[in-house]
Image: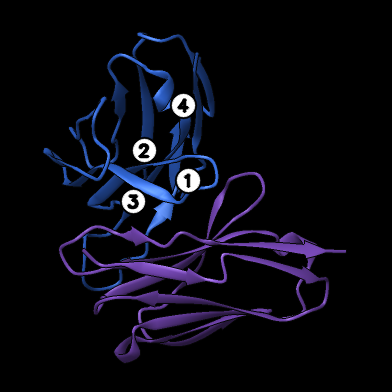
Chain colours: A blue, B purple
Amino acid sequence: NAGVTQTPKFQVLKTGQSMTLQCAQDMNHEYMSWYRQDPGMGLRLIHYSVGAGITDQGEVPNGYNVSRSTTEDFPLRLLSAAPSQTSVYFCASSYSRGGGQNEQYFGPGTRLTVT
Amino acid sequence: GIQVEQSPPDLILQEGANSTLRCNFSDSVNNLQWFHQNPWGQLINLFYIPSGTKQNGRLSATTVATERYSLLYISSSQTTDSGVYFCAVLRYGQNFVFGPGTRLSVLP
């Protein structure tokens, strides 16, 4: 298994540009989520999905869109990048949102800089 | 929502020393994980431990769910143990909540 994969690893954007961060998992996990981590801070939840076709907002959703058309993929879209979105972005997946064996696995992260 | 605290916030050790990191949470949880974020930013799963004790080499963890805390023990620390240690908890039907982390520096 590749686990959770993210592309790209690094990205530099100009203010106002749009882009999509890709995330995929091959563990047949229902629950997927996106976090951002700013310097010296913990992880904050942006959006999450409990299954294909179902998404919801987390703690810091503004400026980001998500969709979940398949179980495997959960892309994060920045519609109009702003310097405040400079951060490291992590995608994660787990079997479900609660109950049972529910270990969460993280991708390697995407380091985004907006100038 | 549930609150997660970690202590100490920072820890500096000499190589070979032992340490204990603590995670307190404010409500009952179904799941608890410990992660290590290495200096390159990777988040590595250490333990999935909603209750009980587990050991993996020099690391072990204990969660006392009834008292709402978990401990991560690192024995004979090595420079490669440096980084930030996060605990994350999950209540059924909710999202994972991360603690603020403990930053560990192991000096040679």
Q: Residue at x 57, y 71 (%)?
A: B8
Please say if the residues under marks 1 and 2 sit with CB atoms less than 8 Å apart: yes
Give the amino acid at mark 1: Ala
Front label number (3 vs 1)? 3
Picture layout, residue A75 above or below residue A49: above
Circles 3 and 4 on the same chain: yes
Give the number of the disc on residue A2: 1
Q: Residues within 10 Å of mark 3 (few under 14, many from 20)?
A: many
Tell me how far mark 2 sits from mark 3, CA to CA. 9 Å
In this figure, which residue is indicated by the disc labeled 4?
A: A86
Give the amino acid at mark 3: Ser
Quadrant position of the C terminus of chain B in the picture: bottom right
In this figure, which residue is indicated by the disc labeled 3?
A: A93
Tell me how far mark 1 sits from mark 4, CA to CA. 27 Å
Picture layout, residue A103 above or below residue B28: above
N-term mark: 2 or 3: 2
